[in-house]
Image: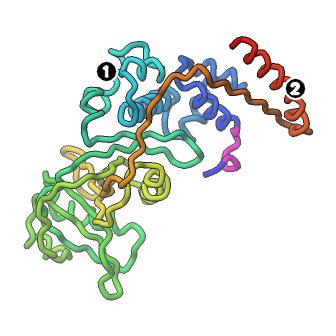
Amino acid sequence: MNASSFKSEYIYDLFRFIEENISVDFDTELLSNIGYVSRGKLKYDFYSLSGHSVKEYVRKRRLSNALVLIKMSDMPLADIAYQCGYSSHQAFCRAVRQTLGLTPTEYKNGPTYYFFPPFNGEPLHSVTVSSVTIPRMSRVLFCHKKLNGIENMAITAFLQACPNYGGRIFGRNGKQQGNKFCYELYLTDSNIDLLSSCGFESAGELFDFNATFAKTTVRNDERKINAAWNYLYSVWLQNSMFEYTGEPYYEEYILRSGKTGESHLPAKLKLYLPLRARNEETKITLINNPGLYFVTAKAAGRNAEDRARYLRAFRAKLKAYINGRK
């Protein structure tokens, strides 16, 4: 996904503006004025590109920035709250609890991690890292000569055989069986004999275990699922403090209560990527050092380098002024 894919390239400038002013209160009216578009077009383009409303995107980015500081710095919670755009310490605590079910202190000292990245042209996915108990399950294999759509073919066949199923369903790609592709289903409650008569092959049991997973939820669409997995592996994991363990991943199908069968395939999946913490962990310490001054000069367009170089005289004068105040 890139800017050339969209007629409204102005929206990329707005993403940069939001990121540079993430702690400032602004609304769609201000953004529409900056982008020279109507509020309706802004809302449509923003959602079409990111999958989030402006308000939801800003909320998640603020929370993500604040939680990084909680986990990786020694800043007081009140300072983090105000720096990241929250109106009060209480509002910040409420936001953390609503999203994660934890207090900021519990989050800082616990094994859970939350990360929502800034938009860079790739699909956005909210990722949570936590300890998960995978329950004991029966493992069955579904084989088919076609690979495309094999996941939903397996789910459809299973729900036709067990239309009143009330357990949990996990899945993952399996090893090719002869000239057929394979998809594995993991079921917490199943009738193996019934499934065997419907084309499934029993493959033993998976015993319950606990591990650390990165989790994200995605719509049950093959392109979106593949994009989400690519994002977890190629983008999120590379910028996180975790590494892939090499153990099996899982996809959990979220069943809609009372709606099963071929015409009611699960609308969403939860992806589980097994992780472990990297050996090196960066700790951020913020200190106040008023003795340091930084001056930058930049220019854009024709002869930008020459015009930026011209500002050396300004920097020299400013340095002399600063030294004179000491």
Q: Residue at x 31, y 21 (%)?
A: 94
Figure quadrant of residue 72: top left
Question: Of helix, strand and loop, which one carries label 2?
Answer: helix
The residue that label 2 is drawn on is: 313
Q: Which residue is drawn at 71% across and 11% down?
A: 325
Q: Which amino acid does label 1 sit on?
A: Arg
Q: Earlier in the sequence, mark 1 or mark 2?
A: 1
Q: Which residue is drawn at 33% across and 49% down?
A: 215
Q: Per the image, is 5 magenta?
A: yes
The residue that label 1 is drawn on is: 94
Provide the residue span drawn in magenta: 3-9
Give 29 or 99, whichever is nearer the viewer. Answer: 99
Question: Of helix, strand and loop, which one carries label 1?
Answer: helix
C-alpha separation, residue under disc 1 versus residue under disc 2: 50 Å
Q: How crowded is mark 1: few (under 14 residues within 10 Å), some or many (20 or more)?
A: some
Figure quadrant of residue 273: bottom left
The picture places residue 93, in percent across and down from the top left corner, at 31, 21
Q: How crowded is mark 2: few (under 14 residues within 10 Å), some or many (20 or more)?
A: few
Q: Per the image, is 89 magenta?
A: no
Give 9 or 107, whichever is nearer the viewer. Answer: 107
